[in-house]
Image: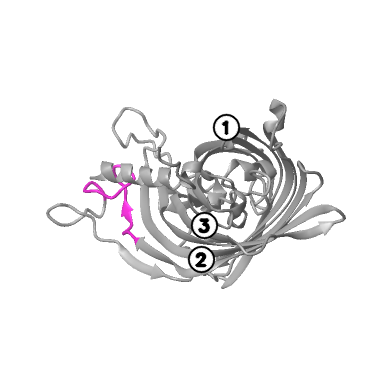
Amino acid sequence: MFLRKKYYQLLIILFSFIYAQDVYSAYGVGEMLLSHNASVIGTGSIGLMPNFQRDVSLSNPSTWTNMPFAYVSINYGGVQIEDKLNNRENILSGLNQFQFILPIQGRYAIGIGFQPYSSQLYSLKSNNTEIKYIQQDTLNFNRMINGGGGISDFSFSLSARFTNTEKGALKFNYLFGSSRNQIAYSLNEGNNGLDDDFDGVIDEDGENSVNYIYNQRNIYNGTLINGYLTSDRFYIGNRSLTISISFNSVLNPFRINNYSFYPFEDINNNGYYDINDYPQPAGNDSIPPSALKSEFNNQFIPSQYAIGFNLELTEMLNLQAELSDWSDLANNQNNILSNMNYQLIDYRHINISAIRFARSLPRYWYESVHFRSGIFFREYNLKKYILNDNKFVKYDYNDIGLSIGLGVKFGLTKNQLDFGLNLINRSDSINNDKFITNFNIGLTIGDIWFVKRRAKK
């Protein structure tokens, strides 16, 4: 039963697209995953402006009416987070996004998508060991917190062309997922000069340790609504200027079902509660007692506003800029979301990008390639509630990054293979600075069969 449960948790992790293992995924609902496809990563943007093809962004449904074919897009990515001071690194990868987009006669479009929203995967141990002297014994106390899981995002989008120059869209995001949080306290009696486990070795590592474990699990669900508006009516001189705006808000309040399990002494050190632990589970089947269930409705209230500009310098060369402000309007005073008790309260993003789009009718092979580049800045602000002082303390960290990317067109239906790379320097006011490498590869296949069936012979 317990083995099956572990496999089930592993599947949840895989299908929730867990993407980063570091202290940042221990804050709030986890590390926000903001760039889901290779064309967005290649420009270092949030995907508001056209970056997939000329006049088209996979992340902005108001541009989908410009698509000539229906598309299926799959993106796979990997991330490496390197601790500069301790020379440690975490490397993980996973499926980043799936999309199906169906344009209808150049006036409408619908689409569905499946992608990660946030991830949690961390194992953190305190560097501070508290020493207590009780009679003639020396007791060392330490604390470890572990967590894993995440929130996935299933989206449904509708877009329409209002005029020749204005297009709009609505996107509905159903967020769902789960996470587990564990707090483990380790008590070590120190070197007592005895062979406590009778294996012939005195005071070996872990011989005199006792572990106490407390587990929680969260089940998440909620719905967001996004609005998009794109206009092509503006010009600077004879150069076309495209402007896009978007907003994001809560449609159905985000609900968290919290399951709090009884703490126990993990005598056999297997990490879960069983008949060998203390207190011993009661009953004929030795089943641990049921968890205490609580429901919370206002622990996570995300909101976002963004604006972007695309200046068409030539038919193929475009200069872009985007600004975004994301915030969590909840006022949390507990650690239901995370054992760290930190809440990401706002996140700001700005990028400047340059794209050389492929030629519509290429004469040479390199004219079938999109070239993307950009520079971006991100600022994260967090707060932590201090129960003893009844106040919040704030904390921040910042990213500066470079991005490069390629997109290769092939086939009659403008299929595309995309590559995107981010090189990010993260400066942190509390933790060690990090160097982050983010890579993504995407394959997008177009087909006219979804739009217009061939005539029967």
Q: CA distance from mark 2 to mark 3?
A: 16 Å
Where is mark 3, residue-wise?
340
Q: Is residue 312 left or right of residue 260?
A: right
Which circle marks residue 411 in the picture?
1
Q: Position of residue 416 (x, y in %)?
A: 59, 36
- Quadrant position of the N terminus in the picture: top left
Q: Which residue corresponds to mark 2?
A: 300
Which residue is rendered at x = 31% and y = 48% of the image? 272
- Please name the amino acid that badge 1 sits on: Gly
Circle 2 packing at 10 Å, graded few (<14), some (14-19), many (20+), is many
Q: Residue at x 36, y 68 (%)?
A: 294
Residue 105: x and y in percent read 55, 53
In primary-sequence order, the first of circles 3 and 1 is 3
Label located before the other in sequence (1 or 2): 2
Of 167 and 126, the residue lying toward us = 167
Q: Amino acid at mark 3?
A: Met
Q: CA distance from mark 1 to mark 2?
A: 44 Å
Residue 397 position in % (x across, y down): 67, 53
Q: Secondary structure at mark 1?
A: loop
Would you say 237 lies left or right of 116 here? right
Q: Answer yes or no: do the residues labelled 2 and 3 have beta carbons within 8 Å? A: no
Assign a secondary structure to mark 2: loop
Magenta span contains residue 64:
no
Position of 353 relative to 367 (above/below): below
Label 3 Cα crowd, 10 Å radius (few <14 / some 14-19 / many 20+): some
**From which residue to which does the magenta span run?**
260-277
Q: Residues within 10 Å of mark 1 (few under 14, many from 20)?
A: few
Magenta: main secondary structure: loop
Q: Amino acid at mark 2?
A: Phe
Q: Quadrant of the C terminus?
A: top left
The image shows residue 420, relative to residue 320, as above or below, that is above
